[in-house]
Image (cartoon, grey):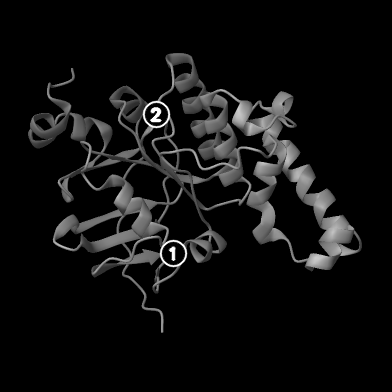
Amino acid sequence: MLATAPPRPAPPATPQRRRAIGEVLLAVENISLRFGGVRALTDVSFDIRKGEIRAIIGPNGAGKSSMLNVINGFYHPQEGRIVWKGRVLPRMRPHEAAAGGIARTFQNIALFKGMSTLDNIMTGRILKMRASFIEQALWIGRGRSEELRERAFVERLLDFLEITHIRHTPVGKLPYGLQKRVELARALAMEPELLLLDEPMAGMNLEEKEDMCRFILDVNEEFGTTVALIEHDMSVVMDISDRVVVLDYGKLLADGTPDQVRNDPAVIAAYLGVAHG
C-alpha cells in the first residue's frame, strides 16, 4: 500500500526568473546510505518542486551522485524514503523509475558509441513503444507506425537542441560537448517529469557551458520539465537555479535560494571558500 506524504508550503520563485513553482514533486526524507562501514549519505532530507531547477552541490565525495542514484532506484538506502508525487516509492529499479517519469544523465557519458546520434536518441523512446519484436523487426503494423511516429518526435528534439546536422554521425566520433548534448536529448526523449543531470557541464569549455545552460533553461521553461542537477561551476548554479541544496560528507549542510546558500557561513567555510558579493 502506498503511503501519502503531507503537503508542504511552496517557496517563492527566484526574482530573476519569476516562474511559477508548484507543489512538491519529489521528497527525499531522512535518507541514509551505507556501503559496508562507509556512510555515503546520513539523514538527508529535501524536496524538489514541480517546475523548478534544483541544484545539488558540494565538494567531491559529498554524496551528490549517490543521492541521484537513490532517487532513480539504482541504490536502495538503508533508512528513509523517497516520495514521488505524494506516494512513497517501493524498492524500484532504474527502468521502473524511467517508466514513472524520472530520466537521468550521467557524470561519465553513457552512450552507444558505435550508433548514430539519431539511433541513440531513439533508445529513449523504447518505453513508449508497444509493438512486438516481430512487428518491429519486419517493420509491419504497429512496428512501422510507431517507428515513424517516434522518429518524428526525435527529429523535433534534434532541432530543439541544434544537433540536426549530426543525426547520422556515430556519437563516438563527436566532440565531448556534442556527446553531452546527445545524452541530454536521449533523456528528453523519455518525456520525463523530473530530469536528473549529473554534472552536465563537466569538461566543457565556456562556450559549450553557455550553450548547455541555455538548453537546460529552455527545457525547463518550454517543456515544463523539472530539473535537478549536480554542478561544480558556482556561476552556473547561481545563475540558473531556483533553489540549492548543499551536501558535505554525506550530510545536509544548507538548503535555500542561491543568495541564501551563497551567503551561508557554513557553505562558505566548507565549499565556496570565499564570500561572493
Q: Position of residue 157 (x, y in %)?
A: 67, 37
Q: Residue at x 89, y 57 (%)?
A: 139
Q: Residue furthest right?
A: 140
In depth, the one of 140 and 246 nearer the eye is: 140
Q: Position of residue 79 (x, y in %)?
A: 22, 69
Mark seen at residue 202: 2
Query: In the drawing, does residue 275 fall left or right of residue 256?
Result: left
Mark seen at residue 85: 1
Q: Residue at x 62, y 26 (%)?
A: 173
Vertical order, 81 against 163 (above or below)? below
Query: In the drawing, does residue 239 fall left or right of residue 209?
Result: left
Q: Secondary structure at mark 2?
A: loop
Q: Quadrant of the C terminus?
A: top left
Vertical order, 228 against 213 (above or below)? below
Q: Position of residue 135 (x, y in %)?
A: 85, 64
Vertical order, 29 against 233 (above or below)? below
- The reply to whether residue 254 is visible in this rendering is no
Mark 1 and mark 2 lie on one chain; the one further toward the N terminus is: 1
Q: What is the three-letter code of the residue carrying label 1?
A: Lys
